[in-house]
Amino acid sequence: MTQPVTIIMIEDDEGHARLIERNIRRSGVNNEIVSFKNGTDAMQHLFGADGSGLVQKGNALLILLDLNLPDMTGIDILRQIKENKYLKASPVVVLTTTDDSQEIKRCYELGCNVYITKPVNYENFANAIRQLGLFFSVIQVPPAAP
Amino acid sequence: MTAEAQRRRAFWQILLISAGLLVLTVISAGSVYLVNKAREDNKWVVHTIEVENQINSLLLEIRRAESSARGFLLTQAESFKIDHEKAVAGVIPALDKLTRQSGDNPAQRENIEKLSAAIEMRLGQFAQEMEFIRQGQPDKAAALIREVVSTDATTAITRVATGMIQEEERLFRIRTENSDRSQTLAASMTGIGSGLVVLLALISTWLVRRSARARDEAEARLRDANVNLESVVDERTADLREANDEIQRFAYIVSHDLRSPLVNIMGFTSELEELGGDIFRRIGGLAQVSANGAPLAPAGPGEIVLDGADKQLSEDFSEALGFIKSSIAKMDRLISAILNLTREGRREFQPVKIDTNELIEAIVSTLAHQAAEAQAEIHLEALPNVVSDRLALEQIFSNLIDNAIKYLKNGVPGEIRIRGRTKLGYAIFEISDNGRGIDPKDHQRIFDLFRRAGTQDKPGQGIGLAHVRALVRRLGGTMSVSSELNAGSTFTITLPIAWNVSNRNRD
């Protein structure tokens, strides 16, 4: 039985979150979106109270991650997700304003699946998000591990 | 140490050497004089002894003559006679010699006259004695001898001679004393002089050692100062580097964080624009509905034609949004420029050997199209090769050549010249053009970020030269411009021929 994919959005800027959500919806993706405004709450949700990640066992997730968070860096979250046996199969899309090549390289090294720079130009921004919607329809979210 | 002290020491040293020379001269002259005097005195002493000897030998001759005469008288032996004659013959020359020797002394001369008279008299008596003996009258001879003994001729000879000897002995004593005195004088003079010279030498040595010590101390101080200076320079460099890094981080974070709200502003402005479109379409639709009284099918964009006040509202709305969007776009460009600059500033430079001519030829060929459009010719002269960062050099030269092409005078064929030379470990490059030039009051301004000068008829952000100067500085070089309005510009770049990572590298 296939499970609908839940989109976890970790984005401290409400405006960005709203714009991302809108554009995802516009691209025809209707999956549930759970947003978090800071890293701590997101970690709590992803890894559970015991921090083992067991709570998400069997859930199909797609994680949208901003790197600049008020309480921790997105890089740390990315690393922990990719080190956790229950979460590491979930695709992670890094969405941030940084277009620094070093940082992009680092994210890919840590196992990020897609890196999207938020351009100021709204057309491009909307396009990027919409392509992400296309990406959602193409990717095969791995079946929940037994 | 002060120059005054140095001069004083030099003066003292010269004075010491002069004093040493003077003392040596005086000692030499004094010694020569005193040695001569001593020799003279010695000669007189010897002379006195000779005179005394001569007197004694004269007396001896007379005694010999006397005793041989008596022997002859007693024995009539021929050998005594010969002896006597020999002695008598020796008396006169001995007397003559004595006369010559003591000619210098008036007292002795008087004595000699007396002595001569006595001796002559005695010789006369000898001759008489001998005559008597020869004539066979020994009695008369004996009587004569007795008479002679009683007369004062012999006593006179003895007395005068003794006087003379005493006189000579007196002279001997005086002259010996004189001689001793001069010799002592000479010895003391030499001794004192030598002592003085040794003293002066000691003082001189002391002075030299003191100055050597002062020099060593000065050298040590200089070394300390150098070491200190180096550490101070290192410290300052570290501080500056830290400050620079901080500015870079600051610029990076600020520009980065500014971008985040900008994404929202732009995003929601675009949303507003769409919303606005929807609203005005709706207004248009409603207006038409109220005018025609008939409902309309949903209209596509652009199908609704607004009129009157509604049209004006829509245009104002679009205009305002247009300004907002263009300002956001501009702000984004500025932030991107700062980000790029800080990114450049954080890039590690790699020093490699660069064939400058080849590098610039490559740049010129990529700019050939622009150059042809601007009717510009680029002349490249032989340039010195350097060890530096390739990408940085490419950016520096392409920015400058691009600028030169971009800011030519309208209607005047451009002529861009790139020259190079080396000086004291630095390569100096000059990029000159015959373009529109830069007002001297703007020479500083053109290197500032986002600042431009002259007629603003070309697109640009005011970043190029700021970037170029930042790169040149990071490569340990300097750059300057010399230009007059309408008289072309020359940009001069001075770069170290062999740039070393360690002198500017972070970490």
Image (spheres, grey):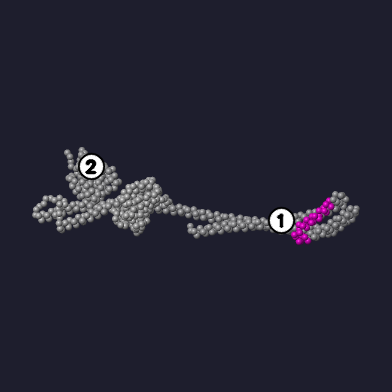
- Can you identify the residue that label 1 sits on? B43
Q: Chain of mark 1?
A: B
Foreground pick, B316 / B126: B316
B105 in the magenta segment = yes
The answer to whether any part of residue B280 appears in the image is yes
SS assignment for the magenta stretch, majority: helix
Provide the residue span drawn in magenta. B83-110
**A44 sits to left or right of B414:** left
Locate the C terminus of chain A by quadrant: top left
Locate the N terminus of chain A by quadrant: top left
Q: Mark 2: which amino acid?
A: Ser
| Rendered location of residue B38, percent (x, y) | 68, 56
Query: Badge 1: few (under 14), some or many (20 or more) residues near its Cα, within 10 Å?
Result: some
| Rendered location of residue B196, percent (x, y) | 59, 57
Query: Badge 2: few (under 14), some or many (20 or more) residues near its Cα, within 10 Å?
Result: many
- Can you identify the residue that label 2 sits on? A90
Furthest toward the right, the residue is B136
- Taking the spot 17% from the left edge, 53% from the top edge, the residue there is B277
B167 in the magenta segment = no
Q: How many marks?
A: 2
Foreground pick, B69 / B344: B344
- Determine whether the residue tagged by mark 1 lies in a helix, strand or loop: helix
